């Protein structure tokens, strides 16, 4: 099967678009409003961009009403957002934080997680999360949609502080990913978590390239 999503109806009962780019890492993002209200929400369009300096991005669709997401507004107005690693153990809190609630609701309380202070960012981070990035807001690129909900804000930030819990670091100084079980988004209502890893090195690469790929300091 094939079809043109611009002009043809999908021949399947569920669109395959959202279930092909998988698994998608989750940007579980905390911000604070200019009025001091803590916000927490998951975004499955989240990614690292480069490492020198460490830059990240997330994409947030507008609400069907045409309103922009609180995370985007808060990041723009305060200049900061915080990424919290979403894990299998925290899956229910992640799901609760996906609900649309009023701007004056403290979403840390709503999700039942603990707000820990950041060092640089004005808003809190999720204390139960094994790793967090404090991100300084850089810019927003708005892309036009075919509907209110289709509009998207692509937000860029620079990671200026990294937090990692000691318990999830192996003896050789790497994150213990199978122990952490990071949460990832699939299509439909489906998620997965990382429970198995394997290693592959690119043949013929030099030592400098290998150091860069592995992130060795």
Image (cartoon, helix red, strand yellow):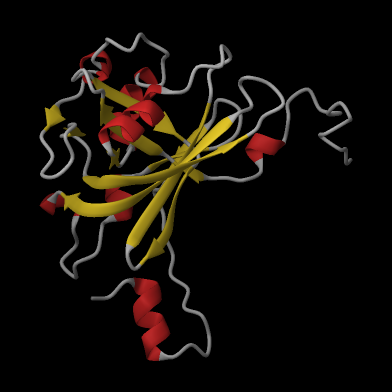
**Residue 95 coordinates in the image, percent (x, y):** 39, 22
- Between 135 and 217, the one lying in front of the other is 135
**In which image quadrant can residue 51 be found?**
bottom left
Tell me if residue 23 comes above or below residue 13 in the rendering: below
- Between 96 and 34, the one lying in front of the other is 34
Specify the quadrant that holds the N terminus: top right
Write the residue at 43% across / 70% down: 199
**Residue 174 coordinates in the image, percent (x, y):** 24, 64
**Residue 74 coordinates in the image, percent (x, y):** 32, 28
Q: Is residue 1 left or right of residue 129?
A: right
* Number of marks in the rendered image: 0
Q: Is residue 141 left or right of residue 126?
A: right
Specify the quadrant that holds the C terminus: bottom left
**In which image quadrant can residue 212 be found?**
bottom left
Write the residue at 40% across / 74% down: 213
**Residue 131 coordinates in the image, percent (x, y):** 23, 46
Tell me if residue 38 comes above or below residue 77 in the rendering: above
Write the residue at 53% across / 45% down: 23
- Between 85 and 182, the one lying in front of the other is 85
**In which image quadrant can residue 197 be found?**
bottom left
Tell me if residue 86 comes above or below residue 175 in the rendering: above
């Amino acid at each position: 099967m094939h079809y043109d999503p611009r002009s043809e109806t999908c021949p399947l009962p569920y669109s395959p678009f959202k279930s092909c780019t998988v698994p998608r890492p989750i940007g579980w993002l905390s911000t604070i409003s200019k009025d001091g209200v803590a916000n927490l929400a998951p975004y499955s369009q989240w990614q690292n961009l480069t490492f020198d300096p460490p830059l990240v991005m997330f994409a947030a669709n507008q609400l069907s009403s045409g309103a922009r997401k609180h995370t985007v507004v808060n990041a723009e107005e305060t200049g900061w957002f915080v990424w919290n690693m979403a894990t299998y153990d925290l899956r229910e809190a992640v799901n609760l934080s996906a609900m649309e609630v009023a701007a004056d609701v403290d979403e840390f309380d709503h999700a039942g997680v603990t707000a820990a202070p950041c060092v640089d960012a004005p808003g809190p981070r999720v204390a139960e999360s094994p790793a967090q990035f404090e991100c300084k807001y850089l810019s927003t690129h708005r892309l036009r949609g075919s509907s209110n909900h289709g509009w998207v804000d692509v937000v860029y930030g620079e990671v200026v502080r990294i937090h990692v819990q000691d318990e999830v670091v192996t003896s050789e100084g790497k994150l213990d990913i199978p122990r952490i079980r990071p949460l990832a988004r699939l299509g439909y209502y489906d998620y997965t978590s990382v429970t198995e890893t394997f290693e592959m090195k690119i043949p013929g690469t030099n030592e400098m390239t290998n150091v860069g790929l592995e992130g060795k300091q």
